[in-house]
Image: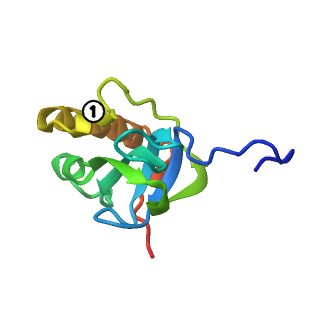
Amino acid sequence: MSRDGKTAVRLMRPGVVVLVLAGRYAGRKAIVIKSYDEGSGDKPYGHALVVGIDRYPRRILKRMGKKRMESRCKIKPFVKVVNYNHLMPTRHSVNIVFDTKVINKNALGDKSLRKKAKLEAKLKLQQRYKSNENPWFFHKLRF
């Protein structure tokens, strides 16, 4: 509830960083792309479309060659629809603008569209990583 006690505060806004709590990607950081608070036809519960990092970039040192640095900077993303019960919102947000025509719920059903969505996510995440904005997002969560 908000301070006036009348309206609910939306925690799962687009751009909010969340932690995935259950399943294959448990412990991974993700960004909310679109939230469905009331649910939708196929999923009658609150859920969100998220883009997250499956394989984080590895540490690089000055003495490493350019080729080795490039391979260690690669990011493997995931695109998934997750139940709100399996997400923990954080106070952080990231302002990466993903193309919602490519990354959407319909893309997850078709294999070729899912591949394009992952590629779009990978390009945007690697671009943000190389610009050195939000460096905390690209570090593995230790727990």
The residue furthest right is 4
- Coloration of the structure image: rainbow
Q: Residue furthest top?
A: 101
Q: Can residue 128 be seen at all in this image of the molecule?
A: yes
Question: Residue 34 at x, y = what percent?
Answer: 46, 37
> For the image shown, how many numbered marks are present on the structure?
1
Which quadrant does the C terminus fall into?
bottom left
Residue at image mark 1:
106
Mark 1 is surrounded, within 10 Å at the Cα level, by few (under 14), some (14 to 19) or many (20 or more) other residues, namely few
Q: Vertical placement of 22 versus 53: above or below?
A: below
Q: Quadrant of residue 20?
A: bottom left
- Residue at left 87%, top 44%? 4
Residues 59 and 37: in front is 37
Image spot of residue 123 (x, y percent): 29, 35
Q: Amino acid at mark 1?
A: Asn
For residue 132, side relative to residue 109 (left or right): right
**Residue 122: horizontal and vertical position, in percent?**
28, 40
Helix, strand or loop status at disc 1: helix
Q: In x, y percent, where is residue 95?
A: 52, 35
**Please, which residue is most extreme toward the bottom here?**
143
The residue positioned 24% from the left and 56% from the top of the image is: 64
Q: Residue at x 49, y 40 (%)?
A: 35
Q: Is residue 32 left or right of residue 64?
A: right
Q: Is residue 26 above or below residue 74?
A: below
Of residues 37 and 114, the one nearer the viewer is: 37
Q: Is residue 59 above or below residue 129?
A: below
10 or 33: nearer the viewer: 10
Residue 120 visible in rendering: no
What residue appears at the point 58 percent right and 56 percent down from the top-left corner?
A: 90
Looking at the image, the residue that sits furthest to the left is: 112
